Amino acid sequence: METLLRLTGIGKAFSGVQALQGVSFDLRAGEVHALVGENGAGKSTLIKVITGAHQPDEGTMEVLGLPVEENDPVRSRALGIAAIYQQPALFPDLTVAENIALGLEPGGPLHLVRWHDRRRRAKALLDRIGATIDPEVEVRRLTMPEQQLVEIARALGADARILIMDEPTASLGDQEVEHLFAVVRELKAQGVGIIYISHRLEELPQVADRVTALRDGRLVGTRAMAEVDRAELIRMMVGRELSAVFPKVEVEPGAVVLEVQGLGCRASGVRDVSFFVRSGEILGLAGLVGAGRTETARVLFGLTPADSGTIRLDGQPVRIESPDDAVALGIAYVPEDRRRHGIIPPMSVASNATLATLGAISTFGLLDFRKERTLAATMVDRLGVKTPSIDSPAGVLSGGNQQKVALARWLASGPRVLILDEPTQGIDVGAKAEIHRLMGELAKQGMAIVMISSELPEILGMSDRIAVMYGGTIVGTVDRSAASQEEILHLALGHEAREAAGR
């Protein structure tokens, strides 16, 4: 089998910190080679070496048997290397078709834009991955999963021989993942080599031929995917046993804290949503992309206020017209896209962790920096945030630690209800276990938690009850003891409930 890419003895350091040391890696034509490791293991640095964003300090790189020296992003693309990153790099004010066209069409002052051909090509690429997205819509109007699909379509349009997929399914539902895997299989048949990075270990056997694990910037090993199981992958990644990826804490639920009946919001497509969550309980909110899970969370937090239905806290009806109302009532919301809405990357960890409690750390309208630092240090210690300092910019932290900072902000406000939207999206297995442990501790302390997740193992592993959404409403609720992946998917596809447990 032809070798498309070969890296030998790659090393890279930043300010004396060794990010990669002696890493070797190869990619064959028509294979999917998974690259795994915890955040900070060196995966991103290795990918940046391949795409020309970083120059290695040592080692060699070959493409199709020819040495590549002084690589850069332009030369990388010319060599047939394309990358799809976890955070979509799209222009929000341009249409989908215009974004896909960037980098694919010739430029220059004499270039004539053929609008019809541009739209037709964009639609063909979107159809190829099963994305029902209008090529004429502005990207700013798309959800995060839809933006991810546009990125995939654009990369496919470049006809790359070497394709890097960095967490491509992080924001996708089951149907979209199946579409993506079908595309991957098609590309393999065409001889394309794919480097596949994912923290969703359960999906690797479905798509990967080989797997390479990195730890602390070093190569742990490369194995045939058929020879390793999940437990072995975890051992390769973290160098230790994880007692449980989903350390569920059994808590006897208390009284109902939050109850909604007939909740609706025409602007967001939410209709007739009814559910309750009790003290010490984790209610999982499952469903496919577009089912209305995030939209329901935004209604509850006052971002798109309800225009019908009733919300009750501790049995008393309340009105939530804005996030200020929600916070005052003790409702906290950690959103899906942590870099856009969960944290402010340039601001310090301390400032991020205390944004929701400025009133408590201010005197006569002036921020008390001593109180800010004390509160931030307490939350960083409580959540185990790994940061050089509370003065470090939040944006330099790993994904898992950024998620902890976003969580710290709301826990500092002492909420009674915590809404978590994709709490472990795009973070490594070790960080996932830490977030899950924190969720268990919060439930044990009596907090009512609503968890939105597209990962069925997470939904089944962490929830006490599971409410499944389809078409903007809840179509069934299943108790943990009666739940299965098959039943959840059955409901998520819009079929009638086969189990009535937990209604």
Image: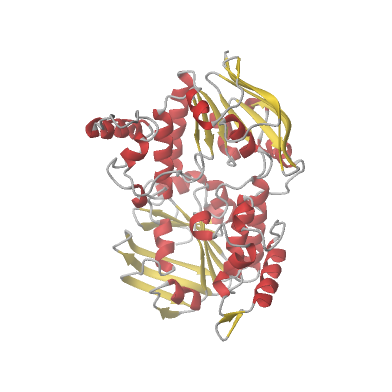
How many numbered marks, from 0 up?
0
Name the image quarter holding residue 56: top right
Left or right: residue 226 versus residue 291 is right
Q: How is the image coloured?
A: secondary structure
Q: Residue furthest left?
A: 116
* Residue 118 visible somewhere in the drawing: yes
- Whole-percent x and y of residue 149? 41, 40
Q: Quadrant of the N terminus?
A: top right
* Residue 250 visible somewhere in the drawing: no
Q: Can you say whether 310 is above or below 435 in the image?
A: below
Near-viewer residue (272 or 384): 384
Q: What residue appears at the point 59 percent right and 63 percent down from the top-left corner?
A: 407
Q: What residue appears at the point 63 percent right and 52 percent down from the top-left corner?
A: 396
Q: Residue furthest front?
A: 109
Left or right: residue 393 versus residue 144 is right
Near-viewer residue (396 or 457): 396
- Whole-percent x and y of residue 337? 49, 54
Near-viewer residue (238 or 164): 164
- Whole-percent x and y of residue 128? 36, 30
Q: Can you say whether 108 is above or below 38 in the image?
A: above
- Whole-percent x and y of residue 240? 77, 43
Q: Quadrant of the C terminus?
A: bottom left
Q: Residue furthest bottom?
A: 364
